[in-house]
């Protein structure tokens, strides 16, 4: 992530929750967690955790979470929101070089992260690497679009993705049972000049082979 992107998210910090609510709803999170079929007593990684959109919901279901984000201020805001009993380990790091050992987690989640990373295929490989055999990777992100202001104002690196490309990257990362579907929700944003954008959100999930 470039310095401008790091500065953008560091500056947002605890204000991200209010901004996020205007972009997309909790329906995206519920779809992702439902696809993973999470079980209490397991361990998940939330990559690009931000202020805890996915992390909080997992912890509420009795799932331990390693929350990774490149922004220290985001992780500070996340930590401040956690309940004392929450089993959450916050780690600062990048999606393309996760500070997690191979085969550690039962699930890897990444919500609205992929369009910010320099190399989406590399990030997916990292998210697959940390899965235990049989573990599940779930991504939610933007469909391909043409809204330039999301790049200039929100520091997006990619204008969403074709779903077939996501499938290819999952397969290249060694994942199986790959599925990509509509998340049942849109991402909405308004530019500084009043231009509106409504972009579809996809959910992609797959498993690391058991053998």
Image (cartoon, rainbow, N blue to C red):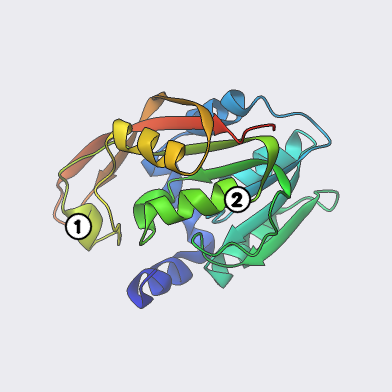
- Between disc 1 and disc 2, the foreground one is 2
Classify mark 2: helix, strand or loop.
helix
Query: Of the residues under marks 1 and 2, which one precedes in the sequence?
Result: 2
Going 52% across and 55% down the picture, which residue do you hit?
Answer: 48
In the rendered structure, find residue 154 and report the number of the disc placed on it.
none
| Residue 169 screen position, x and y as percent | 39, 42
In the rendered structure, find residue 192 and report the number of the disc placed on it.
1
Quadrant in which residue 202 is drawn: top left
Quadrant of the drawing holding the N terminus = bottom left
Classify mark 1: helix, strand or loop.
loop
| Residue 17 screen position, x and y as percent | 51, 51
Going 15% across and 49% down the picture, which residue do you hit?
Answer: 194
Answer left or right for 42 relative to 3.
Answer: right
Residue situated in front as seen by the camera: 6 or 94:
94
Quadrant in which residue 77 is drawn: bottom right
Quadrant of the drawing holding the C terminus = top right
State the CA–CA distance, disc 1 to disc 2.
39 Å
Of all residues shown, which one is farthest toward the bottom?
A: 3
Q: Dot 2: within a 10 Å radius of its alpha carbon, few (fewer than 14), some, or many (20 or more) residues?
A: many
* Residue that mark 2 sits on: 129
Q: Dot 1: within a 10 Å radius of its alpha carbon, few (fewer than 14), some, or many (20 or more) residues?
A: few
| Residue 166 screen position, x and y as percent | 37, 37
Residue 17 visible, this angle: no
Residue situated in front as seen by the camera: 16 or 63:
63
Going 37% across and 77% down the picture, which residue do you hit?
Answer: 3
Answer left or right for 160 relative to 33.
Answer: left
């Amino acid at each position: 992530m470039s310095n401008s992107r790091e500065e953008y998210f560091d500056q947002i910090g605890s204000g991200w929750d209010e901004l996020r609510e205007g972009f997309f709803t909790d329906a995206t999170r519920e779809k992702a967690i439902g696809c993973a079929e999470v079980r209490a007593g397991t361990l998940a990684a939330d990559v690009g955790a931000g202020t805890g959109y996915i992390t909080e919901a997992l912890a509420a279901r009795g799932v331990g979470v390693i929350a990774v984000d490149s922004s220290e201020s985001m992780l500070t805001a996340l930590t401040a929101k956690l309940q004392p009993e929450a089993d959450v380990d916050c780690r600062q790091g990048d999606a393309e070089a996760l500070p997690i050992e191979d085969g550690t987690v039962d699930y890897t989640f990444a919500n609205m992260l992929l369009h910010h990373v320099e190399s989406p295929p590399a990030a997916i490989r990292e998210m697959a690497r940390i899965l235990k055999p049989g573990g599940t990777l779930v991504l939610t992100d933007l469909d391909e679009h043409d809204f330039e202001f999301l790049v200039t104002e929100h520091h997006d690196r990619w204008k969403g993705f074709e779903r077939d490309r996501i499938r290819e990257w999952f397969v290249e990362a060694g994942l199986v049972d790959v599925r990509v579907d509509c998340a049942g929700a849109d991402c909405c944003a308004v530019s500084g000049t009043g231009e509106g954008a409504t972009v579809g959100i996809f959910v992609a999930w797959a498993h690391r082979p058991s053998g």
